[in-house]
Amino acid sequence: MPLTCRGRVRGQEPSRGDVDDALGKFSLTLIDSLDTLVVLNKTKEFEDAVRKVLRDVNLDNDVVVSVFETNIRVLGGLLGGHSLAIMLKEKGEHMQWYNDELLQMAKQLGYKLLPAFNTTSGLPYPRINLKFGIRKPEARTGTETDTCTACAGTLILEFAALSRFTGATIFEEYARKALDFLWEKRQRSSNLVGVTINIHTGDWVRKDSGVGAGIDSYYEYLLKAYVLLGDDSFLERFNTHYDAIMRYISQPPLLLDVHIHKPMLNARTWMDALLAFFPGLQVLKGDIRPAIETHEMLYQVIKKHNFLPEAFTTDFRVHWAQHPLRPEFAESTYFLYKATGDPYYLEVGKTLIENLNKYARVPCGFAAMKDVRTGSHEDRMDSFFLAEMFKYLYLLFADKEDIIFDIEDYIFTTEAHLLPLWLSTTNQSISKKNTTSEYTELDDSNFDWTCPNTQILFPNDPLYAQSIREPLKNVVDKSCPRGIIRVEESFRSGAKPPLRARDFMATNPEHLEILKKMGVSLIHLKDGRVQLVQHAIQAASSIDAEDGLRFMQEMIELSSQQQKEQQLPPRAVQIVSHPFFGRVVLTAGPAQFGLDLSKHKETRGFVASSKPYNGCSELTNPEAVMGKIALIQRGQCMFAEKARNIQNAGAIGGIVIDDNEGSSSDTAPLFQMAGDGKDTDDIKIPMLFLFSKEGSIILDAIREYEEVEVLLSDKAKDRDPEMENEEQPSSENDSQNQSAEQISSSSQEVDLVDQESSEENSLNSHPESLSPADMDNAASISPSEQTSNPTENHETTNLNGECTDLDNQLQEQSETEEDSNPNVSWGKKVQPIDSILADWNEDIEAFEMMEKDEL
Ligand code: DMJ
């Protein structure tokens, strides 16, 4: 937990749901990063870490964990550690005391996972209790019926390595059996697999198919199992699936999910971040061209948002805004550099590292992005960050002599753990299933570009990779060629679409025909709602495409009007004083009154607690809050009343901190502070809300550093690394002067947006002073509770229009604005507000989709 600087212990923090299934009180990060230490030539630290694991780690905890995560992170981590421990021991300098202890631990863990395979199909249960196994009452697991394909199909490398290292064949046998079953169950005409499968019947539960979440590493393990175990049947299966993927899912540069039974039908209009591993796998297969194309497309998305959002639409807009520092793109960058030797990929790696240092680095590590658009952080640094991201980025830049062993002698597991290739010839007693009879010979196209190497493929054309990338350079910008200006112009000209949004009915076949002509497609969501997406390119003519755009614009406006109250996007509180220097960014709820931070410059000032702390009466310490940002506790009176009291005392802004102890934006939905039902125009200062956990980060900082300065804004501002180097807290005098300046600068209007467009947002609103129980009710107005009549369908409307001409103009305009702060050269990049609002509109959809828990 890099913001609060402590480890995340299962049960001691509010549950995050399935994400926590990776945590088994077994020192996950320590184990997952063992072999990274050796790659980074930290042999002394590796030796210490191994001793700590052997001394402290207990695998016998009464915790229900994910079989998949425990396998790839913990079993893989122990085996990777063992592989490099014996390598070091053999070299004769380090680890001389080592006597296969990590391997013994791995074996113990392997036996703990085996009860999960006690199904007739041989597919493992998704979860197991480390102490009690499965199905016993005390195990609290074993009633599940479904698992994901990747969960059941990503075991063979670790299990086979365990068998071959120890001679206990049972592990490899179980993993092979699960893979055999999945292969049997592939959809026979498309040769694709679905996302989830019933572990008892083998029926596909989710019949959509892609290369990202839920399936990804199943394909990876088929190819790598062939590499590690030398078993042709794995290659044959991989090639059969690969042929299907390239036939149906690959639409270069995109990779789009389809239905296994109707593979010509797209299952969704967005892609998830996990598929970023696929170009790396294509390199391993030797299919370089599509790998370069998809990688370049992903890079364009990253350049737009600094990180790859968890999901993004086919027109490259944010679909799910989080980014938990996933390593897949770095992994593919490494493999593409290995294959092409093109220095372009070093530049890509440099950008990744710069962005990590600039936006994710916090005092105790690297914090995940809660939202790539605001730059706000989450108190989370998953173990794969050290296991994979560090390793791949280091390896990308490392020369052969920087690594103390030959990395080519190892294969990377999906968690980037290293397993030695010599295992292929060790303890091969497992009977191999002969699948050749089931294998349909593929035509030669499947083997185009197979086994690439820079000597054979690129000797005469060093610009080969560049020539493939070039047409994709502007793919993200080009995807939205029509600007809002054009739409507005056409509205002004009075042109109307042939079908008015208010008349549209999803059940009317004539309407559907008109939509199709306009390039608008209709996606039926499982919960009964429909989603509209326009691709101008699919329209019958350019005039139809324009009509389609007008129709979509009408839909969005209609949807906005239907929102009963104005909805605002989240805001950011950024701690800018020593030693944070802008590195900690907290997600904050907005207020429906006071200064609107999306229309005005950010407000910056030192914080001071108000007295009384609840801010419900005239402040008794006006001198302390004068010119500062007042901290007030939630509760006992209306938010607006608190705002008036601190404003009267001279505060330049206010942060309301939740009184509900332990609450956090990690686990509770953010809301906006509503007014008091009266006119709130008299409130001029900005007000933001922090849950208790985020608020306590500021309160702790005050306790430690006394002077704490924050920035209230709609999006975190770039920090200036030079200021950090000075390592000096801003002087109090500076802050006082500054505060006075801020009062005037904070009200300076940038005026980037009109009133109407600011309504296209999400979030629920809270009145104030609800009891925790009331609060829960108010916060649980989830999108799923909205009825799905044709008009409400509009809320899921997508519109191509994020990167518009207008946006560009606004961007230029805002870039000429002078930064008002004399001390810090905060980034002058101001994201056009229309684009932010369009993003938030996407967030509504994302939120709705998240209920399906698809990642
Ligand atoms: C890693 O734990 C593994 O790579 C897994 O296969 C899927 N992705 C996560 C990190 O994003």
Image (spheres, grey):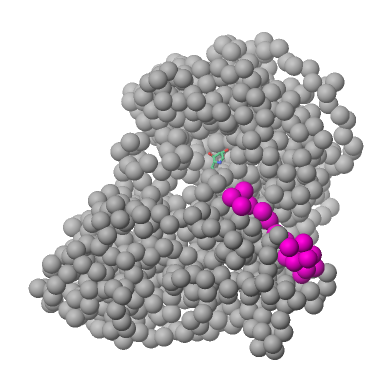
- Report the residue that reaches farthest toward the right: 443
- 225 lies left or right of 732: right
Q: Quadrant of residue 350?
A: bottom right
The residue stretch that appears in magenta: 508-528
In the rendered image, the vertical position of residue 338 relative to residue 763, given as above or below: above
**412 or 831, which is in the foreground?**
831
- 463 lies left or right of 427: right
> Which residue appears at 64% of the width and 73% of the height?
502
Q: Is residue 622 visible?
A: yes
Residue 765 location in percent, x, y? 38, 65
> Which residue appears at 41% of the width and 43% of the height?
16
> Which residue appears at 35% of the width and 28% of the height?
52
Residue 585 location in percent, x, y? 37, 61
Q: Is residue 317 visible?
A: no
In the rendered image, the vertical position of residue 855 relative to residue 753, given as above or below: above
- Total numbered circles: 0
